[in-house]
Amino acid sequence: MVVIGLPSTNGQMGQGMGRPGLNRRQLLAGIGGLTVAGSFGFAALGTGADALASGADTRVRYWNLFSGGDGANMITMLDSFRKDNPGIDVKDSTLQWGNPFYTKLAMAAAGNRAPELGVMHLGRVTGFSPGRLLDPWDLGLLAEYGVNEADFNPALWKRAVIDGKLYALPLDIHVQLCFYRKDVLKKADLLGDDGRMVPVTSTTEWFDALKKAKKAQKKGLQTIGLWTNDQNFQWWFFVTFYTQLGGTWFNAANTEVTFDTDKATQVLEFLRRHVTDGYVIPGAPTGEQFVNGAPFTWEGNWSVPVFSGAGLDYGAMPLPPVFGRQATHAESHAFVLPHQAGRGGAANEAAHRLAAYVVKHAQQWAAGGHIPAYTPTLSTDAYKNLSPQNEYVSAMDHQATEPKVWFAGSTGVLAQDLGPVVVSSTTGSAKPDAVARRMKSRLTTLLASKNPMDGTTAAQGGAVA
């Protein structure tokens, strides 16, 4: 086991600009007290690996967590930027997804070794000590490069603002979707004249649809892929349907837990019923089953290239509004400015120019299934002709997000704490009502805990208890 390497700073980090210092234990505790086997998987990708090799005047170091199809799409966008901006050389580096990425980014920002530009999940920004580990965006510079608040979904922009300053520039939203096989649904009389799945607006209608689909599907397959054993997916599904019920987490001041255990129990019972009624094969490979003919699967929009590449006749819509209100779990990739004590000048301007360019040219990014955050893109003919993206673009207006607290966000403490207990209910090892009470207890503990990365909190011994 290799412990994360730390810069030599005599126990203090990030002293610039009058910011409280974060010591090593605080930073590790803030990310979860991590130790990891092996390295961070740091790899330079794209043609910007050799900074200033082209003789450009300005260098922008850019860290991201995009691999696979997303990584290829990002490289294409960066290469277009380089062609249009020959005076800026971009050194793009892809790091290991998840907590290793956030740990390395935090260490770099606190140790004054941060890149000019980075990417984060928007839900993680609140916990990343904005003002200490992140620098705010210059709205004037963004406007100069053609990006303004009016170009974004209001709810999405609001999530990026903390203490009146913009700390994240949204690139996209990525959502959980209900993928469906048109060939199977047509046999089950569940396909409308428009070629899309007939709407369902209640749990009764949803389970009726599953019953019909099961009769029309191939034998030996599950009816729906539900990722029953995966804590992240189960958590995302819970957030979706709890939001549909109008459930809340905390009061406006984030000083009191308002979690509704009755509504939570309804959601947990709903998820569990998919297993007890025989529509799910626990542990089955969801994507593979769908490709082989399973009628439904609930997956993230990043599965679009996979299913399209397989040549399936399929559609994708936001998770069904079975509790009477449209909402589907959403997160967002967003550009951030990791703290630099001397941020400013040509490199900072180039970072703003690069982020604005990618946000404005996100048609390529949409090919990976993500919904571009820059709303003018959504009104173009090119985007409207993308299928099935044009079927679920409405999810932008019905986002079910985690609460805006320091312990939320992708791979954050909240998901790590509550995801496994949702799994225990769905798989039947714990009763839904007991799980709902346990969830409220955990929320109470988390809300009373301090953010170890805020620069003022006493160091914690590890992850929040």
Image: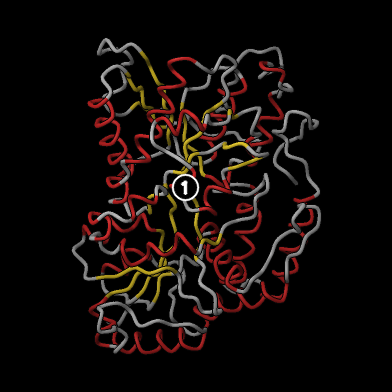
Residue 302 or residue 356, whichever sits in front: 356
The residue lying at 73 percent from left, 72 percent from top is 261
Query: Does residue 416 appear anywhere in the picture?
Result: yes
| Colouring rule applied to residues | secondary structure
Q: Is 426 on the left-hand or right-hand side of 286?
A: right
Taking depth in this image into account, of 140 and 194 the one nearest to the observer is: 140
Please name the residue shown 72% across and 21% down the image: 21
The answer to whether 14 is drawn above or below residue 314 in the figure is above
Q: Position of residue 437 (x, y in %)?
A: 75, 68
Q: Find residue 193 and report its image quarter.
A: bottom left
Looking at this rendering, what residue extends furthest in the left direction? 311
416 in relation to 287, above or below:
above
Q: Is residue 326 above or below residue 58?
A: below
Q: Where residue 253 appears, x then y in whole percent?
A: 77, 52
Looking at numbered disc 1 in the image, what kind of residue is underneath it? Ala
Residue nearest the viewer, comparing 201 with 34: 201
Q: How many marks?
A: 1
In the picture, measured across the screen, residue 364 lies left or right of residue 214, that is left
The image shows residue 381 at horizontal and vertical percentages of 23, 56
Q: Quadrant of residue 222?
A: bottom left
Q: Secondary structure at mark 1?
A: helix
Q: Give the quarter of the figure containing the N terminus.
A: top right
- The local crowd at label 1, few if under 14, some if 14 to 19, many if 20 or more residues have their Cα within 10 Å, is few
Note whether residue 411 is visible.
no
Locate residue 368, reporting x and y percent. 31, 51
Residue ID at (38%, 69%): 317
Between 422 and 355, the residue placed more toward the observer is 355
Q: Pointer 1: what residue?
A: 150
Q: Is 386 located above or below residue 430 in the figure?
A: above
Residue drawn at x 48%, y 39% as measured from the top left: 169
